[in-house]
Image: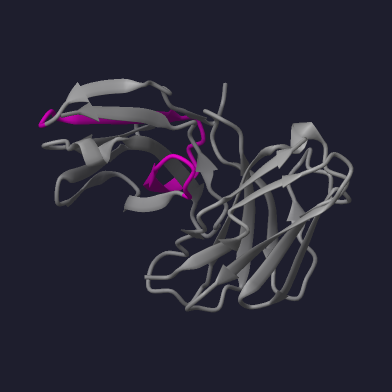
Amino acid sequence: QKEVEQDPGPLSVPEGAIVSLNCTYSNSAFQYFMWYRQYSRKGPELLMYTYSSGNKEDGRFTAQVDKSSKYISLFIRDSQPSDSATYLCAMRNSGYSTLTFGKGTMLLVSP
Amino acid sequence: GAVVSQHPSWVICKSGTSVKIECRSLDFQATTMFWYRQFPKQSLMLMATSNEGSKATYEQGVEKDKFLINHASLTLSTLTVTSAHPEDSSFYICSATTPFSDSYNEQFFGPGTRLTVL
């Protein structure tokens, strides 16, 4: 079993839809959870980060962490064509900077 | 925000030659830099962690004699792919972090370098 599992997609939705992206993980030591957006042939950019369990909202984006289930989610409301990208979850232990990434989910938002 | 640049953004080389990729933190001092490799439709795989002024720490399975990393200053790390072969063709991404940032040791990523070995 890989440390972080993420469905590669692609996930195709119409503009305005609510998008749900998810990752599961096996390492209970993970404390920090991040979501990155990566456009084609570009480096990842940080969208959201959460420490331990709970929810965090930033504009159209909401990140959720359920440590008891080892499950994290990213919700995108009112999705836009410009949201079309690959979304990578990443996580790490407390005190370390080394990140473990999911494979990434490709999202396609059609106008 | 913190900006990390990479040069070149794209390089094509012949098999057997060496290629150097630079990673620079433009507006902050990076005590630690990371080098990742990403194959198409795959995740970022950490290759090595480099700290300024010391030897890089390589991940299991990464040949340190093939992927030479130098972190000579707080703003520059270089990755040299020696005797490159077609299987080394990939997207190489660096990131940088500093313990003095406002956040939680966030990694700031560069735009990546696409290496194609013919």
Note whether B12 is above or below B1 in the view shown.
above
* Magenta highlight range: A16-43
Q: Give left or right: position of B116 versus A86.
A: right
Specify how the rendered protein is coloured. Answer: one colour
Q: Nearer the viewer, residue A51 or A8?
A: A8
**What residue lies at 55% left-to-right and 57% top-to-bottom?**
A96
**What residue lies at 40% left-to-right and 42% top-to-bottom?**
A39
Instruction: State which quadrant residue A18 falls in.
Output: top left
- Where, quadrant-wise, is the N terminus of chain B in this rendering? bottom left
**What residue lies at 85% left-to-right and 39% top-to-bottom?**
B15
Whole-percent x and y of residue B39? 61, 33
Note whether B117 is above or below A96 in the view shown.
above
Q: Nearer the viewer, residue B44 or B49?
A: B44
Q: Nearer the viewer, residue A22 or B27?
A: B27
- Where, quadrant-wise, is the C terminus of chain B in this rendering? top right
Instruction: Reply yes or no: does residue B50 show up in magenta.
Output: no
Whole-percent x and y of residue B21? 69, 58
Evaluate whether residue B48 shows in this view: yes
Q: Give left or right: position of A104 versus B61.
A: left
Whole-percent x and y of residue A56? 21, 49
Whole-percent x and y of residue A6? 43, 27
Q: Nearer the viewer, residue A92 or B6?
A: B6
**What residue lies at 52% left-to-right and 72% top-to-bottom?**
B98
